[in-house]
Structure formats: C-alpha cells, structure tokens
Image (cartoon, grey):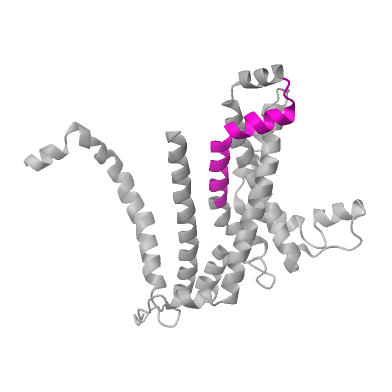
Amino acid sequence: MKKIKEFFRYDNIGLLFILPAFIYMAYFVGYPIISNIVLSLKDVSVRNLANGQQNFIGFANYAEILSDEVFRKALVNTLVFTVSCLVFQFLIGFLLALLFNKRFKIAKPVRGLLMIPWMMPMTVTALMFKFMFSTDVGIINYMLKCLGIIQENIEWLTTPGTAMAAVVMANIWIGIPFNTILISTGLTTIPQELYESASVDGANKLQKLLNITIPLLKPTIESILVLGFIYTFKVYDLVYVMTEGGPVNSTHLLSTYSYKLSFDMFQYSKGSAVANVLFVILLLVGMLYIRITMKGEEE
C-alpha cells in the first residue's frame, strides 16, 4: 500500500497521463516491429504458413536478399529516388519561400494554394500523374509536341530510364509545399534589422543570402532535409500505382520490393527482411535527426 501511495506522488502522476499512449504505441507499433523481426528470422512462405512448420533459419534471409540482384537494384533506386527528390524539392521550395517572403497582394492566397499537392491523397496524385505521363493521351507528350521538342510520343512509364524520371517528378511536385512552408516559417524568425544593417554596410542581395539567410536557416534546413529523407525513402503508394516497380524492376524501391516478395511471390520472410533493412536505415536517420535537434537546442 505504501509503494502505491509513493507511486501516486505529484512528481509521478505524469506517468499515468502517458500510459495510454505508451500502451497504444507498444501494441500498434512495437509489437508489429518485433513480429516482423522474428518473421524475418524464420522460413515462412505460402507453403508452410498454415501448417506451423516454420523453421528458424537465423540470418539466412538477409544473406539471400543481399545476394539478390533485384534487392541491390531496389536499394540503389531508393537512394537515387530519395536524393533526386530531396535536391529538387529543396531548391524549388527554397526559391518559392524567398518569393513568398516578399510582400505582395496575392502572396498569402497563392502560398495557401501551394499546399494542395501536400494535402491530396497520394493515390489520387499517383493516378493523376500516371494519366499525365501516359503515352497516347497524356498531357506531357501533348505539350512537348506542341513546343516542337519531340516528334513522337515518349513511353514514359514503360521505358526503364524515363519511368524513374516520371515518378521522381511526381514526388517532387508533392514535396515542394512541405519545403516551402517550413522554409517560409524559418524566414519569419530572421530579424529584419540584420538585413537593414547589411544594406547600410553596402551588402547586395547575394551577400545577404549567403551571409545572413542561409546561416540563420541552418537548423531549419537540417530538419527539412532529414525529415524529407525519411518521408521520401519510405514512399510506396506513389510508385506502386504509377509503375508497380516496373518496367524490368527499374523503379522498384525497397518498399515496393518488400511488398512484391510478401504479397505477390508469397515469400513472407524475405519480404520482412527487406522491410527490416528499410527500417534500420530510417532508424539511423531518425537518430541523426534527434541528435541534430538536441544539438540545436543546446546551441
């Protein structure tokens, strides 16, 4: 009884408030992660899923996927896809943020409209871009023909090189608002007096950008890049709807390949192993983000 009273002291009462969230996260997040790790250490496929003869094989699944050519291609594709999207999303978002930081009449309404790509369901966006990049009736080929850039329709989604470019462009369109809004928020925290003082000292716009804006936006930029990496690295539905990982595995990401192994090829343990590789990479990046955040708070 005494221990119970000690637990309900004022300085411990906060634990009761976080207990429901802890139980929820443990059951709906922790349990699936642990189950997936255990599944990846077994030999589970459609042949032995129901009969219970699921042998423990250790890290054999990981060794097998590491020697799998499609897995290696999916890993490279994921890195290329993520880095390409991050670079263009950030650059375009940064330029738009600088533009909307200027005071003109339609700045706020247009900035609000820019949030539409971010708020739209991913599946809807994927279907829209799939139609836009279609060979015969797509608006992309129509516009390029009207401009005289091409003479024949490009098979965007059925050619290995152009298919990856198409899904990258689609994801860039989705991620631009995220970068724009966060950078715009960061710009509002920079005192205008610094720019006024720099103007008095004769600094031009480029010097102000390089010596004031970018250094003071460093914490914001770091957060955007790390969060953008996490969001982009695990993209699944956009690529699956547009190309399903094809053609010839040219757009397979770790997420889509894990799905294919698990639900198309019914090799559940191998699919779990691929998903765990994705999980470990994102976990490391998440830990990096926490470290950067804590370092920024200390500074």
Q: Position of residue 297 (x, y in %)?
A: 44, 34
Q: Is residue 211 above or below residue 241?
A: above
Residue 245: which quarter of the image?
bottom right
Q: Quick check: 55 left or right of 290?
A: left
What residue is rendered at 80% in x and 63% in y?
Answer: 135
**Is 219 inside the magenta-drawn segment?**
yes
What residue is rendered at 57% in x and 59% in y?
Answer: 236
In front of the other: 208 or 75: 208
Q: Quick check: 16 left or right of 294?
A: left
Q: Position of residue 199 (x, y in %)?
A: 71, 19
Most prominent secondary structure in the magenta stretch? helix
What residue is rendered at 65% in x and 47% in y?
Answer: 174
Query: What range is drawn magenta here?
Result: 202-229
Q: Can the viewer see residue 100 in this picture?
A: no
Q: Is residue 57 above or below residue 126?
A: below
Q: Position of residue 111 (x, y in %)?
A: 67, 33
Q: Split into 4 quadrants, where in the image is the N terminus?
A: top left
Residue 238: which quarter of the image?
bottom right
In front of the other: 103 or 218: 218
What residue is rendered at 36% in x and 51% in y?
Answer: 25
**Is 91 inside the magenta-drawn segment?**
no
